[in-house]
Amino acid sequence: MKAETQPITKDLIAQHGLSDEEYQKIVEILGREPNLTAREL
């Protein structure tokens, strides 16, 4: 079963305390958009 992913939004980036510049640096380092996956506990 494939995990559902949450879209990365400006609000989500801000909730993690990142600026737009910091987020873009993360994308640059990864070479792709980061993703979040929901996990069942």
Image (cartoon, rainbow, N blue to C red):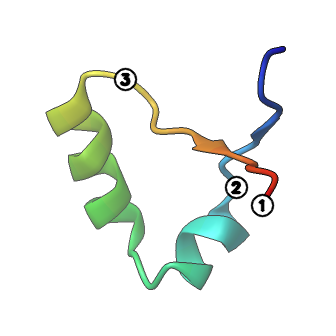
Name the image quarter holding the C terminus.
Answer: bottom right
Instruction: Give the x, y percent position of residue 2.
Output: 79, 17
Q: Are the two marked residues, 3 and 1, in contact with CB atoms closer than 8 angstroms?
A: no
Spatial CA span between label 2 and label 1: 24 Å
Q: Secondary structure at mark 3?
A: loop
Which residue corresponds to mark 2? 9
Position of residue 38 in the picture relative to residue 13 (left or right): right
Which residue appears at 66% of the width and 68% of the height? 12
Q: Inspect the image, locate mark 1, and give the three-letter code of the amino acid beneath it.
A: Leu
Instruction: Give the x, y percent position of residue 34.
Output: 46, 38
Q: Looking at the rendered structure, which numbered label has been put on residue 41? A: 1
Which residue appears at 38% of the width and 74% of the height? 19
Q: Which is in the foreground here, disc 3 or disc 1?
A: 1
Neighbourhood count class around disc 3 (C-alpha, 10 Å): few under 14, some 14–19, many 20 upward: few
Q: Quadrant of residue 13?
A: bottom right
Residue at far left of view:
29
Neighbourhood count class around disc 1 (C-alpha, 10 Å): few under 14, some 14–19, many 20 upward: few
Which residue corresponds to mark 3? 32
Q: Inspect the image, locate mark 2, and give the three-letter code of the amino acid beneath it.
A: Thr
Instruction: Give the x, y percent position of residue 40.
Output: 81, 52
Position of residue 39 in the picture relative to residue 28 (left or right): right
Spatial CA span between label 3 and label 1: 27 Å
Q: Is residue 25 above or below residue 28?
A: below
Neighbourhood count class around disc 2 (C-alpha, 10 Å): few under 14, some 14–19, many 20 upward: few
Q: Are the two marked residues, 2 and 1, in contact with CB atoms closer than 8 angstroms?
A: no
Q: Inspect the image, locate mark 3, and give the three-letter code of the amino acid beneath it.
A: Arg
Please state which of residues 3 and 18 is positioned toward the viewer in this rendering.
3
Q: Looking at the rendered structure, which numbered label has been put on residue 13? A: none
Of pointers 3 and 1, the one earlier in the residue sequence: 3
Q: Secondary structure at mark 2?
A: loop
